[in-house]
Image (cartoon, helix red, strand yellow):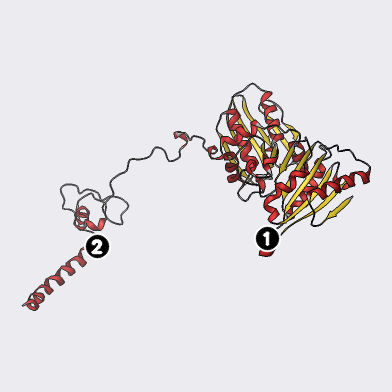
Amino acid sequence: MKIDLTGTTAGKINKALVRGRRAIGTPAVGMVLTLVIVTDEENAYDALKAANDASREHPSRTLVVVKRVSRSPRARTSSRLDAEVRVGAEAGTGETVILRLYGEVVEHADSVVLPLLLPDAPVVVWWPVNAPLDPAKDPLGALAQRRVTDTYTAEHPVRELSARAAAYTPGDTDLSWTRITPWRSMLAAALDQIDCEVTAVEVEGEEYNPSCELLAMWLADRLAVPVKRSLSSGPGLTAVRMDTSRGPVVLDRADGSLANLAIDGQPARAVALKRRDTAELIAEELRRLDPDDTYASALRYGVERLHTVPRQASEDPAGPAAEPSEPAEPEAAQPETAQSEAAKPGSAQPGSAEPAAEPEGGEPAAEPEPAAKAAKAPAKKAAAKTAKKAPARKAAAK
């Protein structure tokens, strides 16, 4: 059942909800929480579909806040609230209210949402896109016990993780963290099977995927070992390789659905590790409403501390750095020295591959090569010209 309200108020929306529940024969309110989705018109459909699918596991009242952009100064000064109330089969197992805000009321969305919250029920706010840097200080985020963001949709996802760490407040979480829950479970189970010590870890995944960085930070924070982040063509996370005292442990997922777990000394096995859709991620986040301390610890580890594996001196292909030597003077600055060296017996001649052999039996040195004579000729001609010009300059001076 759908009820459209144009230019309405929060009181009229509450009355429409009661009227809709009576019309479908369910006057009692059986929702367990209020889910507030803050999005734009472009992403509202996908976010609402994911919330409706998740409501089968968590019956809730879903409030979709769509902030419309006012294009003219007159429209920005006026305020209007349009609502679409959905109950019954079109709203999953709960209730849905789509709120479209225009004008000045966009800046006061909390005053519209507050009267529509379920009494004595927890509140979860989800930003599918364009999440604030500090969700806890946002007017809508301040109403919630749980605040869900998604750094994967940010323009600079990896850079966004640093902002999330700086502004973290208990109750914050991110869908990029939720995406790696199966990976964390599988890796923890693999290490439980063998008694070993992990010495190094490599996390491989596509670029600009914050889930790869979060998994690397979680491993580095929990294992206290160097973690290297390497790139692949995806999709998403593709592999985790751990060097242990009992041999390598590799979890490899090349196709995005089926992974291969290889532990040294054990047969390789195939494990299901598919990429989950948004509805499954939201349903997982709604299962727990307490602060996620593990996420907070991994997030505060810091992205900048990755890729800092110390490099051994023996691995440096260039070897130890050589001491700087004094720069050699150019050959043109020592013409006489070069000529005298060329005339010495046993010195290498220009253009020759081997040094000249020393004369035997005291024989006189061989005649200089034609190349040396040709080098001396221009110098003699230049000196003769200079000598001829000198008397002319003296006469001109007189």
Labelled disc at residue 77: 1
Q: Which badge, 2 or 1, is on the more N-terminal residue?
A: 1
Type of amino acid at the residue the image marks with label 1: Thr
Give the image location of residue 151, x and y in percent: 65, 45
Element marked by disc 1: helix
Q: Nearer the viewer, residue 132 or 231?
A: 132
Residue ID at (61%, 43%): 134
Give the image location of residue 263, x and y in percent: 67, 28
Type of amino acid at the residue the image marks with label 2: Pro
Mark yes or no: residue 44 visible. yes
Give the image location of residue 63, x and y in percent: 77, 46
Quadrant of res 166: top right
Quadrant of res 298: top right
| Disc 2 crowd, CA 10 A, few/some/many (<14, 14-19, 20+) | few
Quadrant of res 350: bottom left
201 lies left or right of 106: left
The residue pinned by badge 2 equals 370
Labelled disc at residue 152: none
322 lies left or right of 39: left
Q: Which of 149 and 223 is in front in this view?
A: 149
Residue ID at (81%, 36%): 32
Mark yes or no: residue 205 visible. no
- Does 95 sit above or below residue 397? above
Q: Quadrant of the C terminus?
A: bottom left
| Disc 1 crowd, CA 10 A, few/some/many (<14, 14-19, 20+) | few
Q: For the view shown, which residue lies furthest in the top direction?
A: 195
Mark 2–mark 1 distance (CA, rounded to whole Å): 95 Å
Give the image location of residue 271, x and y in percent: 75, 34
Element marked by disc 2: helix
Q: Mark 2, mark 1: which one is toward the viewer? A: 1
